[in-house]
Amino acid sequence: MMQTERIRDVIRYIRKFKGSTVVIRLDDDVVDSPLFAGHIHDLSLLYETGMRVVLVPGAKGHISRVLDSYGIPWQLKDGVRITGEEGMNFIKMAAFDISNRIMTRLSAERMTAVIGNWVRARGKGVIDGVNFGSAGVVESVQLESLTRALDDGFIPIIPCIGWTSTGRPYNISSTELAVVTAVALKAEKLFFLGSGATVSVDDFTIPAGAAISPEGRMAAISVDEIDAFIGSNRVLLEGGGEAAERALEIVDFLVQGRDACLRGVTRAHILDGDIDGVIPAEIFSDLGSGTMIYRNNYGSFRPMTREDIPSVLSLMNPFVERGILLPRSSEELEQAAHEFVVYEIDGGLRACAALHSYPENMGEIAGVAVDEAYAHMGIGPKIMELLIARGKSAGFSSIFVLTTQTADWFERFGFKSADIARLPAKRREKWDAKRGSRMLVLEF
């Protein structure tokens, strides 16, 4: 059953993203990784599903090695590389070498790529007395020619080099470039793919209520929560050493991803390039394999519709088989549709529950089902809080549940055991003594 649902997810996402644009910023450490060929193969699969792919390679490590090998002095200031004009030719050589390696690998997958100079840049100049030399910032992306390349079936590769209108080159941030490109193209997805790029509970203080995967990875964070995340990890970020350096890189991805989302990109994602298959796993499943940055509409409650009934039955079925829920027919769900709410993530239903009302001024929470793959996200408590609040608003004197195996869970919300004799008359008619359900009541 679980495998069937995952297959349905893949098909749904293929339909959703066909024709969409995906911008991928990948570190050069990923290019050097044994998994590089696998990642490029995965990109070829995305391309074959009808997605438009743009690649923005980072070249930080490779540039450092090239400059060092030729004895070119350089330094970092606030994360920006500073070299003199003599270093620019070597920076270009390193950046285009990484881009060429990617294009060669794409050719092995029978995909046609093109390396282009679509970026206009200007020098950072002198800031607070510091001359940033060859470092530049992105001014614009030549959208028309870039879009033409995509329309012609090419995979554009954009090195971390920008040119002025007079042809002077500057070294620019590949992360900044990826954001500007994704915004210009109105991309549905922006990926930051780097070795070890994981937002894990082992490394960070994760905000309460955040969606956590079974592996301990923060699966998603809204743009409104990023400042709180940074504040919670201030000690780590200011601690110095390799741990702080890695954490600062993750925070940069979070901040840049937030900027992209606020400027129109649908979603940004931080992905660990050390995980095989991380790209398709992030795209073709709700839980993904990285950390998603979103602005709105990631997961939300809404009323159930008739079209939802097959999915709701599928959600309930594992719990029916284990005797936790009573079986329901399509007809029963259709009649009670107005009393059900569902929780939806990107078009897929992951939870449902109902609040039934009775003349005795009592409400009943029933049919609570959460896809077990998503139980760690706290959807169950959220749906209970929602229905309890609705019960209070409706003026019920109390809400009850009937349960055989989950009494402890309901007690967490303040429900207490009660005599079956308290059941409303209409509900008492359907109660089966053989089933032995317990009644728990929450008084208002």
Image (spheres, rainbow, N blue to C red):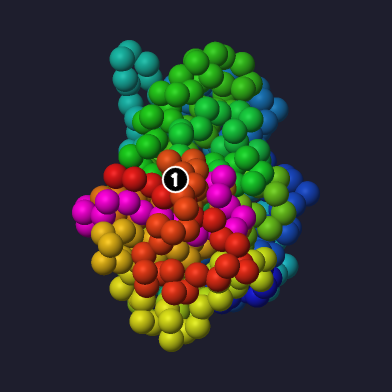
Q: Position of residue 149 (x, y in %)?
A: 45, 70
The quadrant holding residue 118 is: bottom left
Q: Look at label 1 and name its amino acid.
A: Phe
Query: At 60% from the left edge and 36% from the top edge, which residue is drawn?
Result: 200
**Is residue 160 shown to the viewer in this render?**
no
Question: What is the span of residues highlighted in magenta in the rendered image?
Answer: 393-409
Residue farthest toward the bottom in the current orientation of the protein:
331
User: Where does residue 16 sit, x and y in percent of width and height?
Assistant: 45, 73
Q: Residues within 10 Å of mark 1 (few under 14, many from 20)?
A: many
Q: Secondary structure at mark 1?
A: loop
Q: Please tell me in which quadrant of the rendered image residue 108 appears.
A: bottom right
Where, quadrant-wise, is the N terminus in this rendering? bottom right
Disc count in the image? 1
Q: Would you say residue 404 sits in the magenta stretch?
A: yes
Is 162 placed left or right of 66 in the picture?
left
What residue did someone put label 1 on? 415
Give 406 or 11, whichever is nearer the viewer.
406
